[in-house]
């Protein structure tokens, strides 16, 4: 596909369970971002990957959140021991290169509901 | 710290009417400015962006925005709204020294038939 894809589109889980969210960026894009969009809020930056460089994890809200990017392509965001406040839409974006002037292309998001 | 304010949470306009969505930012230098649109169940789509030069920028779907340095604003406009424009609109700011975008909290546009 030509765009950023994310799976699953919806995820309902019970409090305390672990979840994995997947992002397939646009082929050839070296930069990948994860954002969280809570109800009525803007997008909150979570983590950034650029090529083989160490990721910028400064936006991760707690140590229950982690992410990896394998082979410079697919990324997985993992939330351990989910809490109700983790309920949100998790958006992934990719761009051709680093730098704010590079357009970020967004996936459709994963809506996470923690019961 | 850099910030973006979208003062209108909801705006309702009639189809065919003009539209202006407000965005104010806080940043010491000239930022990169973006407007994104998010339709229900969709990711964000870039409408337009400003980096430098002409302060009036044209985007897709008939939208335009004007950068006003003196007011630290980047308001989005459309002369005639279509029902398909109903969506949520996000203003975002980027900085030359960073890859991060700072997003406003969004404005939800409702279009009356």
Image (cartoon, coloured by chain):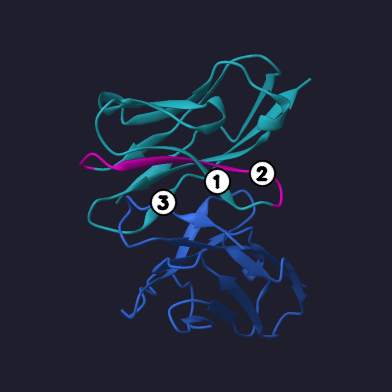
Q: What is the count of numbered marks? A: 3
| For residue A32, above or below residue A100 | below
Residue at label 1?
B45
Q: Examine the structure image and report whether residue B58 is included in the region drawn in magenta.
A: no
Q: Is residue A23 left or right of residue A56?
A: right
The magenta segment is B28-41
The residue where tag 2 is placed is B39
Residue at image coords 49%, 68%: A27
Q: Colour of chain A?
A: blue
In percent of width and height, residue A49 lies at 39, 73
Horizontal and vertical percent position of residue A112: 69, 68
Looking at the rendering, in which quadrant would you find the N terminus of chain A? bottom right
Q: Please say whether residue B34 is one of the residues in the magenta stretch.
A: yes
Where does the image place residue A61, in percent across and percent down from the top left? Answer: 48, 72
Residue at the image point whose x is 46% and y is 25% from the top: B64
Task: Please determine whether, in this image, residue A55 is positioned above or below residue B47.
Answer: below
Task: Check the residue under mark 2 and report the chain it is in.
Answer: B
Figure quadrant of the C terminus of chain A = bottom right
Q: Position of residue A52 (x, y in %)?
A: 33, 80
Mark 1 and mark 2, same subunit? Answer: yes
**Badge 1 or badge 2: first in the primary sequence:** 2
Closer to us: mark 3 or mark 2?
3
Chain shown cyan: that is B
| Spatial separation of the CA atoms under disc 3 and disc 2 | 18 Å
Q: Which residue is mark 3?
A: A103
């Amino acid at each position: 596909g030509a765009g950023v894809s994310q799976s699953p589109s919806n995820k309902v889980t019970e409090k305390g369970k672990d979840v994995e969210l997947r992002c397939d960026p646009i082929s050839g894009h070296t930069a990948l971002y994860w954002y969280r969009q809570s109800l009525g809020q803007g997008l909150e930056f979570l983590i950034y990957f650029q090529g083989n460089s160490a990721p910028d994890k400064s936006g991760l809200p707690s140590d229950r959140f982690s992410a990896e990017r394998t082979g410079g392509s697919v990324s997985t965001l993992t939330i351990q021991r989910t809490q109700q406040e983790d309920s949100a839409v998790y958006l992934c974006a990719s761009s051709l290169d680093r730098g704010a002037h590079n357009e970020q292309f967004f996936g459709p998001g994963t809506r996470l509901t923690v019961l | 710290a850099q910030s973006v304010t979208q003062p209108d949470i909801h705006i309702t306009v009639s189809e065919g009417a003009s539209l202006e969505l407000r965005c104010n930012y806080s940043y010491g230098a000239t930022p990169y400015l973006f407007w994104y649109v998010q339709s229900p169940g969709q990711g964000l789509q870039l409408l337009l962006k400003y980096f430098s030069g002409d302060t009036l920028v044209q985007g897709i779907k008939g939208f335009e925005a004007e950068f006003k340095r003196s007011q630290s604003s980047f308001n989005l406009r459309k002369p005639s709204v279509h029902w398909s424009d109903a969506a949520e609109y996000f203003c975002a700011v980027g900085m030359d020294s960073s890859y991060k975008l700072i997003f406003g909290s969004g404005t939800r546009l409702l279009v009356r038939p």
